Image (spheres, helix red, strand yellow):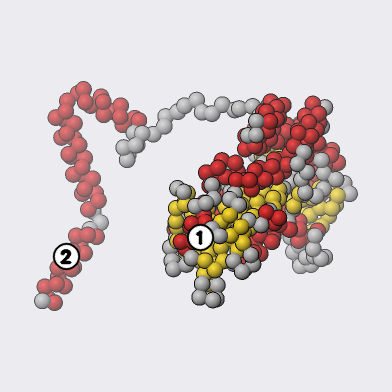
Amino acid sequence: MKHTTLFFAFIFFTTIVFAQTDFKGEVATAKTSYTSGKLEDAHFALQQALGDLDIIIGKEVLKLLPTQLDSLNANTNSDNVTANVGFIGATIHRDYGSPEKKAEIEIISNSPLLGTLNAFLNTPLIGGMMRDENNKTVKVQGYKARLERTDAGNGKFNYKLDVPFSSSLLTLNVDNSAESEILGMANKIPFQDVAKLIQ
Amino acid sequence: MKKIVLPMLVLCGMLVYKPCEAQLLKKIKDKVNQVANKTTGNNDNTQTSQTDNTTSNNGKPTNKGGAGLKNTPPPDVNQQMTDAEKAYDANKYSDARYSIQQALIGVEIQLGRELLKSLPSEVNGLPKDTTQDKVVSTQWGWANMTIQRVYYDGKEKQLTTTIGNNGLYAGLVNMYFNNAYVQADANQQNVKQTKVKDYKALISYEESKGYTLIVPIGQSSMIVWECVNFADENEVMNAAAQFDIDGIKKKLGEQ
């Protein structure tokens, strides 16, 4: 859990681009720069446009996510989309419930790092998708996923479900939960529609 | 009981490890093939000889040739940008993203080609080997492009220039220029700091690799010269001085 938190903290605080979603403006700049032979300016504008698109896609994904998971309501105020230039891709965040009982959805899209991670997850010999008492492979709406649990210290478990797509990863975290509960919640997420948008 | 088991084990071992068994098996196989060929007659013989040409030992067909892949031109940037706008208007954001990425690749490849054109055609008597020109766009990252040019005399002397991101040397550059002061002071110095046209640089020497000169430019790019069979440091520095570092930096949009 600590590692996951650290990982996401790292993601949020490194190379964040505060992209203003002005996609059309950026493409227009890119076109003008390209026509006048200013390739580097065109390149920069296109990269900005890409960041803008990531933000827009993220917001669209948030619209697709359910407003309620089980009995937990979405805290839409903490919805967050960040576009990152570099290796980390875009991140989309939504959480549900209260600090006592919380569920979180994190989606990292278009990250080349995840290509490696997903290859790892799909290779049983090097430890991905393997089973032991705390890890197992499950299928949610036809997608292979990895379910992991850690001891919450109060006789219950914190659960984490990783659903890898080609270069994207959806993670659902639910604290103080049971396997049937997290899988029930996961089934509320429209994976197919989300995958269509972020792939 | 033990007395019987032991000789049996030895016998089994001898049978299994008999070194000439593989040869024996091959001979038997060859004999069987000969007999089979005789009985099937001439027509079949021609067929087998044909199959022998197209199949490998394990029976799978081997590729005898094909036209290969055509060298596709880089993506049409204007077209891709128009496609992106259309996809965006139709709320097909994933398609818009793809088109923007294609446009980026197109721009990067053009940038790379322009850079290659601006490089000298001969360095220290070494002519450029355009067959090894490379422009690699990774689609990811800040300045996500690497350009390579090789100068080669066709014998032993070679200079390879790489411009752009270079993960291989990023660590070394970081250690020397972004950390506290580091300078080796051994009898045999392998890495040292120097300057090329007022740019800070690192030069290193390895017996197996020759000289490597690295000039970081701007925020994330660097120019690397890998010199094989160069006589000394001066020759390397002279070669590097023939490159228009300011021009390269400007083309890459670095500050």
**Residue B112 or A106: which is nearer the viewer?**
A106
Is residue A194 visible in the rendered image? The answer is yes
Q: CA distance from mark 2 to mark 1?
A: 61 Å
> Which chain letter goes with mark 2?
B
Q: In the rendered image of this protein, does residue B126 appear above or below residue A17?
A: above
Circle count: 2
Secondary structure under tag 2 reads helix
> Which chain letter goes with mark 1?
A
How far across and how far down the image is residue B192, in percent?
79, 59
Q: Which residue is mark 2?
A: B11
Secondary structure under tag 1 reads helix
Decide if residue A141 is on the left or right side of residue A34.
left
Name which residue type carries label 1. Answer: Ile
The nearer-to-camera label among 2 and 1 is 1
Q: Which residue is mark 1?
A: A182
Residue pictured at 84% horizontal, 53% vertical: B200
Q: In the rendered image of this protein, does residue A58 appear above or below residue A185?
A: above
Neighbour tally class for label 1: few under 14, some 14-19, many 20 plus, Cα within 10 Å? many
Q: Quadrant of the C terminus of chain A?
A: top right
Q: In the rendered image of this protein, does residue A40 appear above or below residue A145?
A: above
